Every structure is written in C-alpha cells, then in structure tokens.
Amino acid sequence: MNFHFYSACCFLIIFSKVSTAIDTLSPSELLTDGMTLVSRNGRFELGFFTPGSSENRYLGIWYKNMPMQTVVWVANRRNPINNSTSMLKIESSGKILIQVQNTTVVWSTNSTARVQNLILQLLDSGNLVVKDGKDSNPENYIWQSFDYPSDTMLPEMKIGIDLRTGFHRRLTAWKNWDDPSPSDLTYGIELKRNPELVLKKGLEKYFRSGLWNGNGFSEAPNYRSNPIFDYDFIWNESEVYYVFSLKDKSVMYRLVLNQTQSQRQRYIWSPETQTWKLFAVQPDGNCDKYGLCGPNGNCADELPACQCLTGFRPKWFERWNSSDWSDGCIHSKPLNCQSGDGFIRIGRMKTPDSANSWVNKTINLKECRAKCLRNCSCMAFTNLFVTKGGSGCVMWFDDLLDIKYQSDGQDLYIRVSASEAEKKKMAKVKLAIILATVIVVLLGFLLLVYHLRRSRRKLKDEVEDNNLYDGEDEDENEDMDVAVFEFGTIAQATDSFSFMNKLGQGGFGPVYKGTLANGQDIAVKRLSKSSGQGPNEFKNEVKLIAKLQHRNLVRLLGCCIHGDERMLVYEYMPNGSLDKFIFDETRCTVLTWSKRFRIICGVARGLLYLHQDSRLRIIHRDLKASNVLLDSEMNPKISDFGMARTFGGDQIEANTNRVVGTYGYMAPEYAIDGLFSAKSAVFSFGILL
Ligand SMILES: *[C@@H]1O[C@H](CO)[C@@H](O)[C@H](O)[C@H]1NC(C)=O
Ligand SMILES: *[C@@H]1O[C@H](CO)[C@@H](O)[C@H](O)[C@H]1NC(C)=O
Ligand SMILES: *[C@@H]1O[C@H](CO)[C@@H](O)[C@H](O)[C@H]1NC(C)=O
Ligand SMILES: *[C@@H]1O[C@H](CO)[C@@H](O)[C@H](O)[C@H]1NC(C)=O
Ligand SMILES: *[C@@H]1O[C@H](CO)[C@@H](O)[C@H](O)[C@H]1NC(C)=O
Ligand SMILES: *[C@@H]1O[C@H](CO)[C@@H](O)[C@H](O)[C@H]1NC(C)=O
Ligand SMILES: *[C@@H]1O[C@H](CO)[C@@H](O)[C@H](O)[C@H]1NC(C)=O
Ligand SMILES: *[C@@H]1O[C@H](CO)[C@@H](O)[C@H](O)[C@H]1NC(C)=O
Ligand SMILES: *[C@@H]1O[C@H](CO)[C@@H](O)[C@H](O)[C@H]1NC(C)=O
C-alpha cells in the first residue's frame, strides 16, 4: 500500500518536473542549485553541476538525457563555488549573476539594456541568451553565451573577431576533467595580415589551418565534401569568423579542445551505441605540428619526414642528417635579385604561415608573379582563391614556415636563383621529350599489335575448322565487369568515412576500412579530386587494372563514382603494410628469415607479372615497403600499381613531386630526370630487398 503510494508520488514528481520543464527565466525568478532550464527541443539543459571528481559547483550547459555528462559551456570557469547555496538570476538591467547565500556575487555579465520584457532563454542551439521576450531577431540579443565560448564549438556558433570592436571569440580548453578553468590551449582566428585558424599552446602556435582558399582551408581543402557538416569562413571589413552548420540537423555534433591530447577533436553522437564517436582530430600526424621542418623545409608523411624544398639545401647538414630539422633550409644557390631570379612551381602544398604575407583579392597570378619578382624579400606567391581556375594573389616574405605536402594541396611558386629555375625548365623539356618518345614508341607498338592481330585473325579463320586455335584468348574478359558500387553502400560500409575507419593516407588520397552488408571486409581508397577524368574514362581505366590478377597483387574489387568523387575498392589486407613490420622493433621479430624470403619472392613474382606477363605492362612508380601489403598468412601483395595510370595526364608531374618524399627508393635517373622504366621499378625492388 505504502509502496504504491510512494511510487505514485514519485511518478507525479517526475512527471510534473517533465511537464514544467521551462526554457526561460525572468527577472522575478531565481534558478537555485538543483533547478534547471531545458531548451524547447529538450536537447540542452542549464543548471549547476559538478565536473569529474571535483567537489565544486559550476553553472553550465550540457546535453540532456545523455549517459555521460557532456558539458558544452561553463559560466563561472574561474570562480568555483564549494557548496549548494548558489542561485542564478537576471536583473532588470539585463545583467546575469550568480550569487551565493543571497549576498555575494560570484560571477556576472556586463550587459545592460532597457527592455520591457527581459528574459533569459536557453535556445535549441545550446545558446543561452538575454533578450526582449517579444523580439526574435538574433541580431538583437543583449547577451549570448555563444560570444563567450568555453572549450566547445557548437553548430551556428561563430569563432572569430569583430573587427569594429576588436571583440575576440575563441575556444579555451579545460585544465583537466575536474577543472573547467581555462588552460593554455586555445583555438581561434589569428589576425596578422591574413586571418587563419590557429591552435595555440600558450603563445606558441601548435597547428594552423592555412589560408582560406574560397573553398576550404589550405590544410584540408576538400573537407567540405564530408557528409556531416558544412562550414564557412567570412572575412570582410566588419568581421572575420569561422562557422559550421549541420547537413542533418538531428545529428549531435561538437568540436572540442582536448588539453591532454593537445588536439582539436570533432565528435559525433552515435544513438545506437550511446557514445560520442571521434570524427576527426587535428593535428593529425607529424606534419601537422607547426614548423616541424624549420624554415623552407617541407614535411611529408614519409620517412624521414622533412625534405628541403626544391632549390634549397639544409642549413646545417650534420643536424639535418640527424633529424634535427629546426634550423631548416637555405637556398642552394644564392639569389641575385638585381640580375634576375626565377620561380619554380611546387604542386600540392599547404600554404606557408601567413604571419609574414600579403594578399590582394583581385589581381591575377601573372601580376602576382611580377609583383613578387620586384620585391627582393618576396619568397613565394600563389593564387589566394582556387575556385574558378584561381584568382587573387598571396605573397610570402622571408622564410617560408610550416609547409607540408598534401595530396589535395595547391600550387606554390617559390623563388630560386635563375640557374636553378633554368635547370628545372630543362628537366621539364627533357621530360616532355621522353614522353613524346614514349608516345611515339607506344603508337608504333599499337600499330604493330593491330597488324599482328589482323594477320592472326586471318590465320584463325584458316585454322578454325581444325580446332587448333584456342579462341578464348581473343575476347576474354571483354564482358568481365568490374563491380560499380553505390556511394550509399560504400558510405554505409565505412561508417560514412568515419575517422575511426581510416587506415592511412596514401599519395592519391585517404584509405578507409569498410565492411559490406555481406560481411566482406574491403579497403576503400578515396581518390583526391583533381584527376579531371570523366566517369567513363575512369571506369575503363578501372576495368583495365582489374584485369591484372595475380596472387601477389592486391585485388581490385570495383569502384565507385559519385559526382566528381572517385573511389577504388580493394580487398582488405588484415596485416597492413610491410613497413609496419620492418620498421617496428617488436613486430619485426615476427618476420623470420624464411618469412622474409617468402615475401621477397612474392614481391618479385608480382613485379615480374606487372612487367612481363600481364597484358598491360605496368611500371610501378612507387614501390616501397608501405606499398607491399600482407594478407592473413603474411603473403605479400603489391598495392597502388596502376595508380599513375588511373590518375593519368598531368599527375605525372605531381608524382614527381611525391617522389621527393620517397627519395630513398628512387632510381637516380628517375629522381633526377623523371625517367621511369621497368628498370627503375627493379631498382626500387633492390632497395626494398
Ligand atoms: C559557499 O561557497 C561560497 C564560494 O565558494 C562561499 O563564499 C560561501 O561562504 C559558502 N557558504 C557556505 C555556507 O559555506
Ligand atoms: C568555501 O570557500 C570559501 C571561500 O571561497 C571558504 O571560506 C570556505 O571555507 C570554503 N568551504 C568549504 C567547505 O570548503
Ligand atoms: C534571499 O532572498 C530572497 C529574495 O530576495 C528572500 O526572500 C530571502 O529571505 C533571502 N534569504 C536570506 C537568507 O537572506
Ligand atoms: C566587465 O567590465 C569590467 C570593467 O569594464 C571588465 O573588467 C570585466 O572583464 C568585464 N567582464 C566581462 C565578463 O566582460
Ligand atoms: C560581412 O559578412 C557578413 C556575413 O556575410 C554580413 O552579414 C555583413 O553585412 C558583412 N559586412 C560587410 C561590411 O560587408
Ligand atoms: C581527450 O582525448 C582522449 C583520446 O581521444 C580521450 O580519451 C579523452 O577522454 C579526451 N578528454 C577529454 C577531456 O575530452
Ligand atoms: C648528410 O646527408 C647527405 C645526403 O644523404 C649527404 O650528402 C651529406 O654528406 C651528409 N652530411 C653529413 C655532414 O653527414
Ligand atoms: C589590389 O590590387 C588592385 C590592382 O592593383 C588595386 O586597385 C587594389 O587597391 C588592391 N587592393 C588592395 C587591398 O591592396
Ligand atoms: C617588399 O614587401 C615588404 C612587405 O610588404 C615591404 O615591407 C617592403 O618595403 C617591400 N620592398 C620593396 C622593395 O617593395
């Protein structure tokens, strides 16, 4: 009886709590410790809370109905309260304050306004605002918590600077799980000459986004194609800010600074598992670390990480050779500004630090070059915007800092001595001659094949009656179709290209692990979007590559074409790549000599097949340990063959730039003159051996 009575009471209490959930507070009301405001959509809740194992109380906003406390904003970060006597109220002047024991003010805002229907409201976006209750224009908020971010950036929140007042909105990490007070890790817009987003530790830059190129940030120019959120960067006379919005508003998504990892992390809520899933982190890898390679050094996700830019040499060889890159590089031939320098183009780069740069949004590349050439301290230039074929001008002065190679980066024109520029030009001419020769030889070869086939067909007609000729050879595989996967299938298999499924970053784009609905594991290579190949050309190319089948080649299962996005689907290799074994002190013990020997023979057989036994003769231009994958029985399989083919055209040059990163494996004639042949692939094999 009693029990029923109590449960009925409890039910009533809970029910009344739910039904009276309110999202506003007026000047006549108090929010004491224990009471909360709930946004109208029920997503966010405002009240007093205790973080981690701390005993202090803070006023904050968190996600309601979540198994783990996820706080997105804290009011009194610097002024903790050590008991539950606190209350929140709003004065009729528009000022919000937290008081303890009715008297002491622990925290307050500065806002003032003369408004009739003043209210404090927790909006559906997680924004706490002071406003006129009758006015719904967001521009007229008297005060909003989005102007004073803690460590979390939510959709529609602006991170940036109001250029008229100098008001700065930036994120600051919590000290630790238990203490929301501001640490030294901050994330915001750095306004030197050209604004960019910078993650800083104290006064030191830790990671930068690179310039906004009209489409994205230089650091991740194609990131906008992600399925979760869109973003924008506004820069005009009145303000400069970064903002993002969700493509699907029902998704819960946040960007947060993590003090222990010194990272900017993006999380997405997974309703199935009731956990936050890491969607992306920055900095991600060595090359994201600010200035790792010193002045004029270029970083690539290879070993060693740093290379001098073309036309430069290490300032101190001894230090550079022992992986101390902090001194960076200097011009290998001194510049001579008066009698003329030149520029060389380096493709696929993240733009250098903008602290010492200059921009003009209207002038074109040609004028930009002329302007840069005239100013002796101008060391590099390029287009500011990459959209619509490129426009605008950026110039960098003195040392070039924090550059990295990236597959979807942009062109950079670097000042070198006239003789150096001339050398590069000669190399280009040489390459052109070689290409022309190759094409002529190929054409001749094709003609020869055509004639041979015709004569063979004649022969075939003659001998067909005798059944001597095995006709299968002729049209075999012609109708062997490569699977063309739906984008939806791939997205589902890879969990929307989730960060957790990323296997690595290859020269032609990131690789993701996926599982098809039938349980088959796949590896998906998402090609960088610059090949300019049409869908049919691409499909034909894939068909050609798919015909290459050998037990020591990774099998291509199919492809996926979605808009201008191209993906290749391979069988998944559970043991990853060979370099993960060779260069790892513990894992390399797995490789006994007999296993090593088997791997060597396997790679050799695969290479022989590519060079001699397959129909398409393929030259692997980047054979190295990380391109040899191992299946569950440690059988080696060559990957990334035919990529240069698939990618075609102007990629040859991009590949040559990539070569810089893999110098160790390059045959000299390839590294110097760009001359590749079966011999250069065998050279690489020798190094691998
Ligand atoms: C409660 O905490 C506040 C600030 O931490 C302090 O000023 C106040 O004296 C405390 N009250 C009691 C009853 O301990
Ligand atoms: C709470 O903080 C006040 C000062 O802010 C201090 O005087 C008081 O002793 C503290 N009370 C407890 C229980 O820690
Ligand atoms: C606190 O303030 C409220 C309203 O102003 C008042 O009713 C109450 O008596 C005060 N309590 C104390 C302990 O001063
Ligand atoms: C409020 O104004 C005072 C003085 O103008 C300033 O020192 C303080 O930092 C301001 N507080 C906030 C939260 O803006
Ligand atoms: C700056 O851009 C914002 C957002 O597009 C716009 O609302 C504002 O009017 C612009 N200001 C100027 C001075 O162009
Ligand atoms: C920081 O990141 C690590 C690794 O991703 C995670 O385990 C930890 O919970 C994060 N800390 C905070 C305060 O979010
Ligand atoms: C550093 O390495 C380069 C290239 O491997 C070599 O040419 C040079 O002699 C080395 N310098 C020193 C001082 O070890
Ligand atoms: C950009 O260059 C154009 C043409 O030289 C010039 O008219 C304009 O004033 C420049 N803008 C800035 C911001 O320097
Ligand atoms: C070169 O550009 C820098 C930076 O804008 C400027 O300070 C310097 O005066 C310029 N030099 C010449 C010769 O124009």
Image (spheres, rainbow, N blue to C red):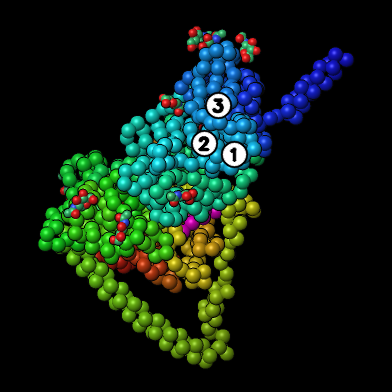
Q: Which residue is mark 2?
A: 146
Q: Amino acid at mark 1?
A: Ser
- Disc count in the image? 3
Q: Secondary structure at mark 1?
A: loop
Region in magenta: 522-527
Residue at the image point whose x is 46% and y is 88% from the top: 454
Q: What crowding class fits label 3: few (fewer than 14 Cα within 10 Å), some (14-19), or many (20 or more)?
A: some
Q: Could you say which quadrant of the image residue 175 lies in?
A: top left
Tell whether circle 2 marks a residue whose Cβ is less than 8 angstroms from ligand 4.
no
One can see residue 48 in this view = no
Q: Which residue is mark 1?
A: 125
Q: Position of residue 49 (x, y in %)?
A: 58, 22
Between residue 310 and residue 130, name the one nearer to us: 130
273 shown above or below 214: above
Q: What crowding class fits label 2: few (fewer than 14 Cα within 10 Å), some (14-19), or many (20 or more)?
A: many
**Does the magenta-highlighted stretch encompass residue 524?**
yes
Q: Which residue is mark 3?
A: 93
